[in-house]
Amino acid sequence: MAKRELPIIAKGMKKSDNWKGRLIIINPEKSEIAKKVKVNQSGEYGLR
């Protein structure tokens, strides 16, 4: 399965297909993880 381009949290949200894991944020206002990684929009993000 080919990897999709996702915004990479560690790289200032630049899109890349070189990621190791995914983070899916549904409700950033209530998510402790979203606050910790400073994401304020719902969506799918890549992790390195």
Image: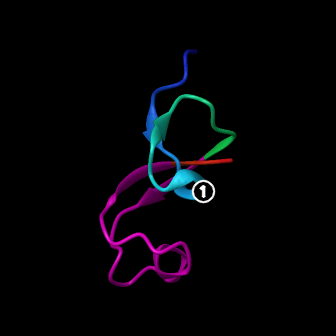
Quadrant (top left, top right, bottom left, bottom right) of the N terminus: top right
Amino acid type at circle 1 is: Ala
Residue at (47% x, 26% y) in the render: 4
Residue 9: percent from left, percent from top: 53, 56
Residue at (47% x, 74% y) in the render: 34
Residue at (54% x, 24% y) in the render: 3
Colour option used: rainbow
Range drawn in magenta: 22-45
* Location of residue 41 with respect to 24 vertically, above or below: below
**Would you say residue 27 sits in the magenta stretch?**
yes
Figure quadrant of residue 20: top right
* Location of residue 48 with respect to 19 vertically, above or below: below
Residue at (41% x, 69% y) in the render: 39
Q: Residue furthest top?
A: 1
Q: Which residue is mark 1?
A: 10
Query: In the depicted view, which residue is nearer to us: 12 or 39?
Result: 12
Residue 30: percent from left, percent from top: 38, 84
Q: Estimate how packed mark 1 is, as few (under 14), some (14 to 19) or many (20 or more) residues with alpha carbons within 10 Å.
A: few
Query: In the depicted view, which residue is nearer to us: 34 or 11?
Result: 11
Residue 29: percent from left, percent from top: 32, 82
* Location of residue 18 with respect to 46 vertically, above or below: above
**Would you say residue 25 sits in the magenta stretch?**
yes
Residue 5: percent from left, percent from top: 45, 30
